[in-house]
Amino acid sequence: LFNRNNGFSFGPLRELCDELGVDKEEFVEKVLQVVRRDNKRGYCTCSDPKKSVDQLVTCRPGKMLSSPDPNAEIRYLVEVDEDWQGAVLAQAFDGYFDKVADLQNGEIKFLPSTTRKSTLKSKSKEVAKNIRTRLISAYKADESQLQ
C-alpha cells in the first residue's frame, strides 16, 4: 500500500471496492459516516456542523506529529470541511493521488505509482532537492516584493 516515497496508495483499496461492488459515492459516504460518528462520540465539537476534525501528519500519511515522550502523545487537530473531504476522497478513489514524482529534464513529472522504479529518471533525493530549491526561490521572490 505504499508508493516509492512511503506515501499511501489507494490502488489496492480501489481494487477491493471494485471487487465488492462498492462505487465511488458509496465509498465516500461510508467514510464520511465514520467521520461523523467519531465526532458524535464527543472527541470534539466543531465550530460548524459541516466540519470534522483530522490530525496533522508529519513525513507521510499515517504518521502523526508526536512527542519524544511516549506518555505525552501530541495530536494537533484541524477542522476539515466535509464537502472538501468528500471531494478529496472521491479523487483518491479515482487514483488521482497514486503518483510518484520523477525529475525529467529539470521538470517534475507525476507518473502513475505503478511505474517501475527502474524506469524513473531520478532518485527521490533529487526530486526533493529540486522542490526545495523551487520553494526557496519562491520565498525569496515573495520577500523581495515585501521590501
Image (spheres, helix red, strand yellow):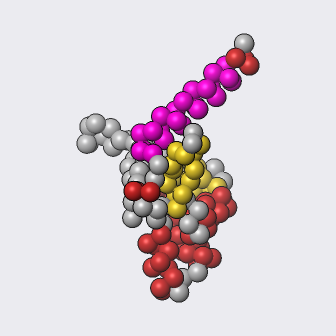
x and y, in percent, of residue 102 in the image: 51, 49
Q: Residue at x 42, y 61 (%)?
A: 116
Q: Is residue 73 above or below residue 112?
A: above
x and y, in percent, of residue 24 in the image: 60, 76
Question: On the image, which quarter does residue 122 sit in?
Answer: top left
| 138 is within the stretch colored magenta | yes
Residue 7 seen by the camera: no
Q: Residue at x 56, y 69 (%)?
A: 93
Q: From which residue to which does the magenta span run?
A: 122-143
Which residue occupies the extreme left position in the image? 70
Comparing 66 with 126, the one in front is 126
Q: Residue at x 51, y 50 (%)?
A: 101
Quadrant location of the N terminus? bottom left
Q: Is residue 11 above or below residue 77?
A: below
Comparing 143 with 64, the one in front is 143
Q: Is residue 63 above or below residue 25?
A: above
Q: Residue at x 28, y 36 (%)?
A: 68
Comparing 133 with 2, the one in front is 133
| 14 is within the stretch colored magenta | no
Question: On the image, which quarter does residue 28 sit in?
Answer: bottom right
x and y, in percent, of residue 114 in the image: 46, 65
Judged by its main secondary structure, the magenta piece is helix
Count the numbered circles shown.
0
x and y, in percent, of residue 15 in the image: 47, 78
Comparing 79 with 11, the one in front is 11
Q: Is residue 129 above or below residue 52?
A: above
